[in-house]
Structures are given as C-alpha cells and as structure tokens.
Image (cartoon, rainbow, N blue to C red):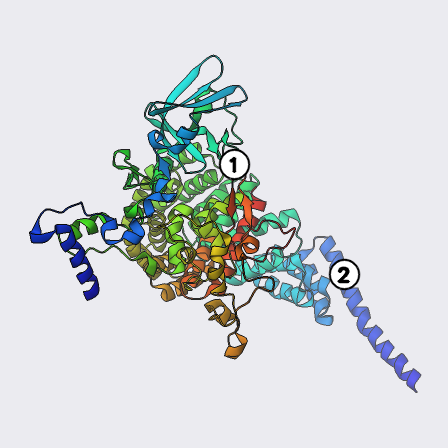
Amino acid sequence: MLIASIVCLIGIAAQAAAPFQDLAARATAAREANDVPHAIELYKQSVDLNPRWEEGWWYLGSLLYDSDQYAAGRDALKHVVQIDAKAAPAWALLGLCEFETGEYSTSLDDIRRAFAQQLDPQMESVLHYHEALLLTRLGRFDEAVKAYTWFVSRGVKNPELMVAFGLAALRTPRLPKEVAGDPQRFALAGQAAYLTMLRDYKDANETFDHLLQAFPRAHYVHYLYGCFLLAAKPDEAMAELRRELEITPASGAANAMLAWVLLERGDTDAARPYARAAAAQDPSLPLAQYVWGRSLLEDGKVNVSIEHLQLAEQRDPSNIETHMSLATAYSKSARPLDARRERLQTLEMLRANAHENP
Amino acid sequence: MRILSLTVGLILAAQMGHGGQAPAAPLTCATCHPAQAGPQPETSMARAIQLPAVDPLFRSHPRLDLKIGAYSYVIERRANEVTYSVTDGRDTLILPVHYAFGVGSQTFVLEREGRLYESFVSFYPAIDGLDRTMGDQQLQPKTLLEALGRDVTETESAACFGCHSTGAVAGKRLNLSAMIPGVRCQHCHVGALDHLAAISRGKLESVPPKLKQLSPEDLSNFCGQCHRTWETVVRNKWQGEVDVRFQPYRLANSRCFDGVDQRISCIACHDPHREIVREDKTYDAKCLACHSAGAPPSAGMLAAHAGDPPSAVVMKTCPVSTSDCVTCHMPKVQLPGGHMFFKDHEIRVVRSGDPYPN
C-alpha cells in the first residue's frame, strides 16, 4: 500500500516536472534563437510552474529589461534576489530597471548592493555611471562628484559623461536626458570639473573662462569656479562664492562653502551668518551642518553644536573635519570617551588615506 | 573685586610715592604680578629667540664649523657680530646672523636681498656642534644659495616669529621692527599692554582674560597655537616620532585626557612663568591626583561606569610604583634628525616592543 502510494506520488511529480522541463527547454531555445517575445512568454509560464527557478526569473528579467519593459523586468528580478541575495548581476539589473521606472532612491540602494559583490568590468562601469547619475538626481551632488572620480582615474571620457558630470558640478538635480535641449553649459562645467580632477589646471582654467563668458548668470557656475580657486587663490574664491550668492541667494552650498573658508581663516564672526543661512537653507547638506556646528562650537555653544556636527557626521561619515570638530566638542562637554572615539577614528581614517594615497 | 582694587590701589600708591609725586620706577607687569612676571624672563620661552650679540652660545663657541658634502660652513663671532658663511671652495656667501631660534638647540635666521633664510645647519648641544637643521635631512643643495639655507615664505616667517617672539606679527603680517625677542607677557596675555596703560591711569577695567580659567581642552588649543594643537597635527598629517614635539597633540591622544578635568591640562603640570622642571619626581603628585586610592573619578571614568554603584567607580592605580611615574608612562623619544629627546606626552602603559603610537 505504502509502495503504491509512493509510486503514485512520484508519478504525479513526474507529470508536473515534464511540462516545466519542456517549457524551460523551449524558453532557452527561443532565447538562443533571439525570439525575445516568445522567450519571455515561455519563461513566464516556466516560473509560474516553478517559482523557485532562479535562472528562469533571471532570463525573464534580463529579456524584459532588454525589451524596455522595466516595470515587469524589475518584478522578475526581485524574485531572483529573493532566492539568492548575493546575485550581483540581478541586483545590478534590478537597480537599472528601477532607474528607468524613476524609483531613484531604491535604484541607488540596489546598485550599491550589486557593488558589494563581484561584477564584470563592463557592468561595473555602467553601474558607476548610474550611481553618479542617481546621486545627482537625488540632489546628493558632492557624493556624485566623488563618484565621477572613478571615470577620471580610468581616463574614461565621452560627451555624455561630461554633461552628466556637469549636472553634478552645477548642482542640478536632473538627468542628462532632461537637459538634452541645452547641454552646453553642463558639458563645459563637466569638462572643467574633469580637468580639475585630473590636476590639469591650465586647461581647466581655460574651460572655466569659456564657461564664465558663456554663462555668467547661470546658477552654480561661480560656485564651481570658486571651489576651483579655493586652494590657490582663496580671496578670489571667496569673491566668486559671493557672486554665486547674488545669483542664487538661497544656495546652502555657496553659503556653506563661504562659511568654511572663513572658519579656516579663523574669522568666526564673518563665518557665522553664512553658516547659519547654509544650515537653514539646506539642512540635508553635510557641509552646511558641519559649518554651523563648528561655528556654534567656536562660539562656546557646545551642546547645540554637537547636534549639528552629529547630523553632518551621519550624512557624510567620510569627512575627517567633522570627526575632528566632534572630538573637540565632546571633549569640551565632559564626554572624554566620545572624544577619544572620534580622535581614534580620525587617526584611523588618516592612516587609511595615507595607505590609499601614499 | 574689592580686595583686588585695594591691592592695586596700594601698589599704585606705593608707585606714586607720597603726595602724588612722579613714580619712582615705570610700572611693569612685575609690579603687580611679581610671582609670574619676575621669573618669566629667565625661562626658555622668554629666550625662544636670542640676538647673536647676547647669545651665550657664541660666547662659549666663538667659532663653529662643519663640512657637508661639497659645502663648508663656519659660524663665527667677531666683536658683537656673528657671521654665517658657506663656501663650495670657489665662491663664498657670508651673511650676518640676525636671530638665533631656540635655547639649547639653535637654528639661525639670515637675511639676503630682503628675504629670510633658515640656516641649513643648526647647533645641537648633544653633539656640541653643528649638523643639518632638522627637517632638511633630505635636501641636497645644488647651489651655494640652497646650501646657505631654506628660503622661508612670508607666511612661514610670520608663523615662526609669531611663536618665538612677541609683537612681531600684526594681521598675519610680519613686522620685525616691532618684535621683542622671546615669548613675553603680552604674547599670551593679549591686552596686557592696554591693561598696563590703564592701570597706570588707575583704571581697572581692562583686565586680560584669565587663562587659568580655561578648560584643559581650551588650554591645549591655546598653548597649541605654538606647541601645535591636535587638529593642526592631524591636518598637516605629521606622523611618526617627529610629532613627539607637539605636546598638546600627544596629550589629547592619551587615554586619560579629559577636556574638562583640571587635573590634566598643560598648566596642571607646567607653570609657563617658570623654567620647565626636568626632575621626574616633581610630576608624581600630578599623576597621583588621579591615580591614587580615593582620588575623585574623572568624567571618563564615570561615563565608563554609568549605572554602576559609586563604590565601583575607582580610579586606576599603578601596581608598580607611586614615584617617578613619567619615567615609565611618558618615555623619552628621540626626535628624528634632531639630536634631542622629548618626553612623550601621550601618557600610557608602555609595553616593551610596542611601536610608537601615532
């Protein structure tokens, strides 16, 4: 009786497996024959029969992505990462689908999940580009500019990249396709920023001249030029930042940068109004929180300064200056253990930097 | 305040003599503050710059010479002038020594065609002679002028004289005509001259800020303006044994440093108005102020034991000794290329074979 039951169960399973295996084989054949619509249909039927078939979901997702069916592709790829959380290509393609469907924040998260795994070089390049685009679109311009260093260090350069880089450099939360009608300003800004990162200061300066002549009243052109001048010509840099504030009075970034230069010069009184304005105008900007926190610290308002410095640290933990100021603030507020932690972290970051950039 | 007014009034009356006659001697800082201003001129800080005519070095060593590679150096005293010469065998540069920086080890400042030079060779008591100036070990002079010394920028000159003398820097610019050699009262006590003038007129309003009321963290930053703050060392990425000179930095790295505990500050151990005390035993009481049974717990100790009963919060004591603490816990470290040792102010338990902590 028992044997009969087992034989019966095996028979039922075999009947179920036979159509799945048949469907899977036909889906594969259609895909290999480049019959994409048919392959998509067959993969859909296959995963309906066997929802744990990771390979089926993967091919379904990638075929849907290739056919510009991003929402459906996203849904298929979510199954892949549910089955295998370490499937880097699936996270990557999922992020790219979400990029296309306009789910920018989720897209960025998923692309970064893909980075945590091993990727092939071509996919890595695509993902770095999209990461930078997403950071720009989400208004995280400073992080976006940092993301473009990946391309600068590899000598990757093309017109689309320059426009994209220019959007980040001019703090414009748009994608290149959204400024397709007027890309010149961004292309020039991207070129100038790229050359600056290459330390080709002569050509960068010439490009800035073109940019300033062509777009003297455009938002963030003077800000960008001011940032370029900061190290070598701080007085001229401050003048450019002030010009930016005439054009963009509510710019948290320009106010924050000006405050930072003044704080570095030890002129807390002059820095204070800019720092306060920066924190009010752009509270999500780490530099704004940092300069306002540091300004408060130097005014002796230690406890409230800690609140702002902590916000700056949360939003940009890689900024050594924030850890340094927090160490001082904690030390002044009878929190020696926290001060020591921040100091040790600063020194550790310094050592890591020295190791990476000997 | 009333007691202070009476005291000052008495001193002023004594100065004025009976019947409001002209003062017997000019009012100085020492008139009212003899304990501080009396011994201060004899300190090393007060002699941080010495004029060659009165520098004891040139009395004991009227001629110093050294050959480094192709260049021969002679520093020679003739009457009241000291000259510094360098020759390559064909040509010779001879310049008067304008200033000698330091008390034991000395580096010389020369002037040529309106520019200041730091001498390529310095005097070191440990070898009782000349050697390369610290920091110049890697330099390989290619010309006689380079062999003479290092051309010092205006900013660097202002920083050097700003710390080694008094009144030489106004608005970040160097003004040697106003310079008083060494660190004198008004160097630290900003406003002391106005205070002196006001006191001469019998007015008490212009009292300079009381530095001893600063917190340890603020004092470290105050003294660190010359001895280098923790932040200055971090920003300049000075790492390795060379940073042992920067006591506020090293102290802040100590596990026991607490920015609000007056038992661990620059002036808890050192009286800047008196010459540094070099007997290790002298500092035992400072260490035992915290590290002895019954010593009040520090803020850090309380934080580490938050929630514990008060009896559990006990300051650590040394299991080895209660004397000569600094010989073990603040070892002497040789300054690379400096022919001198500094007490490491990173107070710690030193284990044999441990690398120098950065």
In the picture as drawn, the residue positioned furthest to the front comes out as B18
In the picture, the quarter occupied by the C terminus of chain A is top right
Mark 2, Cα crowd under 10 Å, few <14 / some 14-19 / many 20+, is some
Coordinates of residue A203 in the picture (x, y in percent): 43, 33
| Left or right of A194, for residue A243 | left
Residue at 89% x, 84% y is A5
In the picture as drawn, the residue positioned furthest to the bottom comes out as A1
What chain does badge 1 belong to?
B
In the picture as drawn, the residue positioned furthest to the left comes out as B19
Give the residue pinned by disc 1: B126
Which-is-in-front pick, marks 2 and 1? 1
Three-letter code for the amino acid on which mark 2 is drawn: Arg
| Left or right of A180, for residue B81 | left
Nearest to the observer: residue B205 or residue A260: B205
Q: Which mark is residue A287?
A: none
Coordinates of residue B240 in the picture (x, y in percent): 55, 45
Give the residue pinned by disc 2: A26
In terms of secondary structure, where does tag 1 sit? loop
Nearest to the observer: residue B310 or residue B303: B310
| Left or right of B224, for residue B26 | left
Looking at the image, residue A201 lies above or below residue A112: above
In terms of secondary structure, where does tag 2 sit? helix
In the picture, the quarter occupied by the N terminus of chain A is bottom right
For the image, the number of numbered tags is 2
What chain does badge 2 belong to?
A
Coordinates of residue A320 in the picture (x, y in percent): 48, 53
Three-letter code for the amino acid on which mark 1 is drawn: Ala
